Image (tube, rainbow, N blue to C red):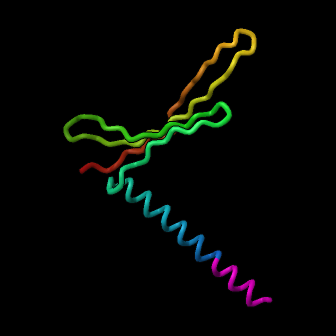
Amino acid sequence: MQKVIRIGSSVAAIVLLILTLACGASAVAVHQRIVSPPRLNVELAGYRVVASPLTIRSKPPKYFYSVWLFVTTYHPVSKLRTEKGEQIMLLQLQGN
């Protein structure tokens, strides 16, 4: 029984190591602009996260990855919907 537990914990440790290395490698690839950053638009229970790459056209051009958080509120009396957004991350990516 101890051998099964030892093998199971070794497999779990290897899987976690692979996931950690994969996340780190993908973050470096996005930062170096080897891989284009993902566009994201996810909404859940009145919260919306929007992420997209940005390019500022200057000499030399500057590249960023921006993440915004939007909060939607509903007013019960007037039935109006308001949405407020805030930029929560701006990551500068490497140039060419």
Of residue 44 and residue 93, the one placed in the foreground of this image is: 44
Q: Where is residue 31 in the image (x, y as percent from the top left)?
A: 37, 53
Going 69% across and 79% down the picture, which residue do you hit? 9
**Quarter of the view holding residue 92:** top left
Going 78% across and 89% down the picture, which residue do you hit? 2
Q: Position of residue 42 (x, y in %)?
A: 56, 39
Going 41% across and 43% down the picture, which residue do you hit? 65
| Magenta part of the chain | 1-11
Q: Position of residue 84 (x, y in %)?
A: 57, 24
Total count of labels: 0
- Quick one: which residue is furthest to the top in this view? 78
Of residue 56 and residue 45, the one placed in the foreground of this image is: 45
Q: Where is residue 90 in the image (x, y as percent from the top left)?
A: 44, 40
Left or right position of 56 against 27 = left
Going 59% across and 73% down the picture, which residue do you hit? 15
**Quarter of the view holding residue 66:** top left
Secondary structure mostly seen in the magenta stretch: helix
Using the image, determine if residue 21 lies above or below residue 57: below
Using the image, determine if residue 61 lies above or below residue 13: above
Using the image, determine if residue 1 lies above or below residue 54: below
Left or right position of 41 against 74 = left
Which quarter of the rendered picture does the N terminus lie within? bottom right
- Quick one: which residue is furthest to the left in this view? 59
Asked whether 93 falls inside the magenta stretch, the response is: no
Of residue 93 and residue 12, the one placed in the foreground of this image is: 12
